[in-house]
Image (cartoon, rainbow, N blue to C red):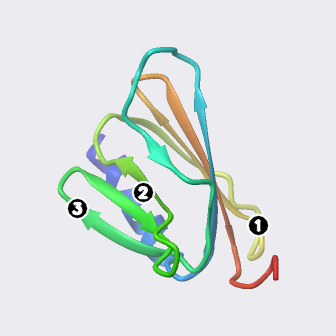
Amino acid sequence: MEGHSKKLMTFLMENQGKDFDATIIDEIEGHVGFSFTNYIKRAKIHIQSGRITVSEPNTGKYFCLPMSGIEQFCDKTSGRYDIAVTIKYYNGYSINIQIFEPGWKD
């Protein structure tokens, strides 16, 4: 499990400053633990005790990911401009994150 946390931290830190699009998939109702907005421009990565926060400094938008309870870390990257990952947690949540070069939507 610790290996998955390190992979997540490394992946996010390597992509700091890029744009993030994150989607939560909640297959179990009634669980709480994830909170985020969907699209983060020019992300800043903050590592705190037990979690990683991806934030947008100018607007205050953010999402947080727990560092523990990661069941699976799947790198879905298929090229320089198609960077993606899926993180599956033991509690049934999955997070899909896609990374874009800054300004691709502008």
Q: CA distance from mark 3 to mark 1?
A: 28 Å
Please tell me which of labels 1 and 2 falls first in the chain.
Answer: 2
From the viewer's perspective, tell me whether residue 50 is left or right of residue 10.
left
Looking at the picture, does residue 84 appear above or below residue 58? Answer: above
Instruction: Give residue 47's position: percent from left, percent from top.
Output: 28, 66
The residue indicated by pointer 3 is 48
> Percent position (x, y) of residue 103?
75, 85
Q: Amino acid at mark 2?
A: Leu
Q: Amino acid at mark 3?
A: Gln
Tell me the element at label 2.
helix
Residue under label 1: 82
The answer to which of marks 3 and 1 sits earlier in the sequence is: 3
Answer left or right for 99 relative to 74.
right
Of badges 2 and 3, nearer the viewer stands: 3
Residue lying at 48% horizontally and 66% vertically, measured from the top left: 11
Neighbor class of circle 3 (other Cα within 10 Å; few <14, some 14-19, many 20+) is: few
